[in-house]
Image: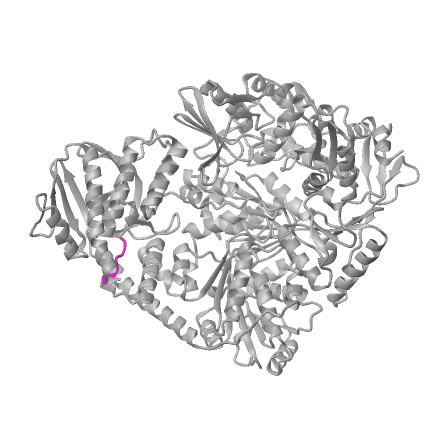
Amino acid sequence: MNKQNQFISAEVPLVIAQAPEGRDALFIAQILNNTKEGDMLHIARDDQRLHNFADLIAFFSPKTEILIFPAWDCLPYDRVSPNPNISAQRMTTLSKLAAPPPPGRKRLIITTINAAAQMIPERDSLKNLSFCAMVGDQIDVEHLTTFLIRNGYARSSTVMEHGDFALRGGLIDIFPSGHDSPVRIDLWGDVIESMRQFDPVSQRTADNIEEISLVPMSEIMLDEESIRRFRGAYTRQFGNVLDQDPLYEAIKEGRRHQGMEHWLPYFHFKLETLFDYLPDCPVTMDTLTGEAFADRRAAIKDYYQTRKEAYDQTVRGRAGSFSTYKPLPPEKLYLTSQQWQDYCEDRKIHQFTGFHAPPDVNHMMLDGKVGRDFSPERNNNQALNVYDALRNHCTERQSSGKQIVIASYSAGSQNRLAALLNEHGMSDHQIIHKWANCKKLPAGILGLVILPLEHGFETDDFVTIAEQDILGDRLVRKVRKSRKAENFIQEASALTPGDLVVHMDHGIGRYERLITIDVNGAAHDCVHLTYHGGDKLYVPVENIEILSRYGAEGSDGQLDKLGGAAWQGRKAKLKQRIRDMADELIKVAAQRALRKGAVIQPPEGLYDEFCARFPYSETDDQLRAIADVIGDLSSGKPMDRLICGDVGFGKTEIALRTAFLAVMEGFQVAIIAPTTLLSRQHYKTFMDRFKGLPVKIGHLSRLVTSKNQKLTREELAQGTCEIVIGTHALLGKTINFKNLGLIIIDEEQHFGVGHKERLKKMKHDVHVLTLTATPIPRTLQLAMNGMRGLSLIATPPVDRLAIRTFVLPMDSMVIREALLREYYRGGQSFYVCPRVSDLKDIEELLREHVPEVKCAVASGQMAPTQIEDIMNAFYDGKYDVLISTTIVESGLDIPTANTMIIHRADMFGLAQLYQLRGRVGRSKTRAYAYLTLEPRRLPTKQAEKRLQVLQTLDTLGAGFTLASHDLDIRGAGNLLGQEQSGHIKEVGMELYQHMLEEAVANAKTGIADDEIDGIWSPQINVGAAILIPESYVPDLNLRMSLYRRLADLNDRREIDAFGAELIDRFGDLPEEVEHLLRVILIKYFCRLAGIEKIDTGPKGAIVTFRGSKFANPAGLVEFMSNQSTITKLRPDHKLVYVRKWSKIANRLQGSLNLASALAQAAQNKATQSE
């Protein structure tokens, strides 16, 4: 009997032996490939294994439908709900399993032990819970809305996540469970006219679809029956609700509540298990899954006990300061050990193992064994031995008739591996995309495949070698779609009442609100500003670009007086200072360009070998930055390049490769970091990476003994130490290099003035690479362009497990659980407070509620050496929790720290929160961020929006865009010089950046100051209603941010595209919006023509030119002579244009034609002068 038949006909649970990971998936795939229809269930030990197993099955059995059923990603008895994407995936799978199985379809359901051990809604309750519609169907919008709300969908102004929906007139946006993209339904009356998928980031539609099927987003349907059932069960278990119970109150009112899923049994008549959904199908599970169940069961019991003790104390009158959590008994929601045992026996759950089976159990043997690991050769300091051993191994296996494939994690790592194989004489290989083709490999040819295998395996006729077996540990995750979220972020960071703004002509004022005022009988949206003394200013929305943010939300600045001279004086003085600074920057760049630098070229073979030690796949950004650096090094001029990217985005890798190139050409390298901790980190990284290479690496900082420091200094002078890593100790006068060729500076802005001066002298004619994790505002990126090389790394080198982010009221139980979970898995945690005054309270809170952990406290008020000592001790693992203000360093990399709790998260800015959260999640371990709020006090609407955005942006690529965009940025100015923060205080961050960008551009081109165009905004008065009506875009913040985006449109194409986007997102344009877009287009031509103002009326228009001048007087004369009967120039240099414009439409079109013609006349001069 063959193995597959033995498995299918087995009447008792089997241990399937000699089935290492990879071979187990191949065995299941072989069964599925020989099956015409039916289901199988596989239980993985954890989430990572679940996704890897799914990828393996997709490769080995491409015709099998794979259904994923993940576990909730929150703790048992948590205060937060599962992630909406997890809920969506669970409900999609359950809905498919509840429906009759499709004929002729074979399916593999893959779950985890945590998911299988938890009860779920009974199958019958899901059978009729769907909403299906096709194009042409008539639907009841009210009925659809009720269905969505009851089944866990959330109403939102912008649909971005699974479970969001929005209603706007005749448009319905929904992101359904089980769909990759949201759907926009276009109604004509109550009939579906069209349905299109759309991009959740750009909000633009793409492909048409003909039908949609909506399944629930939640395992709880909040209808009258389930609410009544919950209230009855809850009061029976816990007695009448006397105290404030937010959960009970919310459910009673038909509202969803964070964490309500943990009372799932109270909402349903009956619960079942996943096994009940699949009564007859074969079940397999990973090795050690039984042990994983026992661990899970113990954890559930522990969590329940903790909650129960806190609840009992409250009942006995010792109430805590937080609303009491009333836990339901674990057996109501989770399988007991006995139930699990019964299922294992009744359902014949077969377990895989990579080893031989114990003699006393029922088993079957496969032909698998764990593949060859080349770590002995890799670790004996002779890198080339790995490839010799690999070649010998492959030759030996092929000579015995076995086919060989080498599995890589990604296409990038596959290409790199192919290049290395070619270099080492193994060029007989081909890329394989299908499992069927592996069997057809010609003799002596290696197959290269993409498969998520940590280690290879071998069968009687087949050998798989994993990339990790050859190159060492790879830290690779499946790359998810990067979200370039520019517009979304811009929309999320709209102005809110109370924000300080800067008016180009009137200075600093306070934004009060968006107000619709009547201008000559026409409705007009204006921005209401308040100035010193209560003076008011109304700025039309079409002129919003003359306003800029002053700084972060909550920035303090002095309001200016309307009409006062102080503002103009401050601005003029600052303009001069900025101009001087720009001239200095250009001068430095020019001098550097004239000097000669050492030419450094990558050595063939050795360089690729060094790069292959990088345990990730490079991102496009990294490859571009590396190419930039190599271009600089080989140019013959001294390199001066800044690598800018957030922590963990792979800047250090670029430093390593650059250092390697310099050392191979015989140069010495100095790496300078601002703190002992960062220098220690770099030293460790460099030592690991250069292991086995004939390169001497030294370390200089106050933590190194004086004896070792002296030795390193001598070796540097003699040239025997090729790489030295240190703090500002490296800048001392006693340090002499024999042949310094490259300086790498980490976080230069953290060095003092004296150290910077010494750096300038050292930099004179050597190559310089600067690394920074401080986001650079985009305007600054433009300003620096051409003066020093700038490479941005905006995507992480690996899509690390997204940081699971929770926003919740402060709860000592959740804090305790979060810190202890990290503590028991051997990790560390950060606890960040917005104010120094909070530190003592939090320290006491942890001493009382989490006495098991050892805490350290750090704040900016301590001496720098004291902070460094605490940080070093934390890095060494001497403390479990670091309680601090926001001094958690920007370059800090502590892979063991994977939990962060942020106290009063509503007090932080968006970019600050993003950067803080980026300190965790630096390894393979799942990271958690808890953003806590003050209980019983609601955050401001804008703070709530910020926290919502942060929860949404757990894809890391978008975050860097966010940090560059959001002008909460601290210290960005220091990249150009220390005095800038004072300048920013005078005029605000946005305007300062604009002035700097302009000054640098003019210094480069040599344009005189009086020719600088500056920020100005043409005024167009046409007597038309100009606004985005509330009925068209109901959300005020979204309206405000759309106005802000309008101000950034630069040409006709962008204006047309913006109009098309509005139609796509919100429906046909109302007349007022059409007027607004037309006015924006007229303004575009006015700027080209130098027109400051156009006043229109029934008898025509009066045109005011900027500075009473026209760029091309001859062109104006020609324009007037061609229209002599209807134009004349007044003594005050204003142009009168006589027309009969009784209708608004005539005025808009006429003004457009006039502005366009004058722009053409003005541009003719520009063309001639060119």
Of 982 and 478, nearer the camera is 478
1013 magenta-colored? yes
Q: Is residue 1009 left or right of residue 807?
A: left
Question: Residue 250: horizontal and vertical position, in percent?
Answer: 52, 26
Q: Residue furthest left?
A: 1131
Q: Is residue 528 visible?
A: no
Using residue 958 as the reference point, say whether residue 537 is left or right of it. left
Left or right for 607, reference 977: right
Establish if 226 lies above or below 932.
above
Where the N terminus falls, by quadrant? Answer: top right
The answer to if 773 sits in the magenta stretch is no
Residue 56 found in image quarter: top right
Residue sitting at the far right: 359
Q: Is residue 326 above or below residue 629?
A: above
Task: Locate residue 713, reporting x and y percent.
Answer: 60, 79
Q: Quadrant of the C terminus?
A: bottom left
At 89% from the left and 34% from the top, the residue drawn is 362
Residue 626 coordinates in the image, percent (x, y):
55, 62
Residue sticking out furthest to the front: 442
Residue at 81 percent across and 58 percent down: it is 395
Range drawn in magenta: 1011-1015
Q: Quadrant of residue 119?
A: top right
Asked whether residue 1002 is in view, the answer is yes
Q: Is residue 518 above or below residue 797?
A: above
**Magenta: predominant secondary structure element?**
loop
What residue appears at the point 37 percent right and 65 percent down from the top-left corner?
Answer: 979
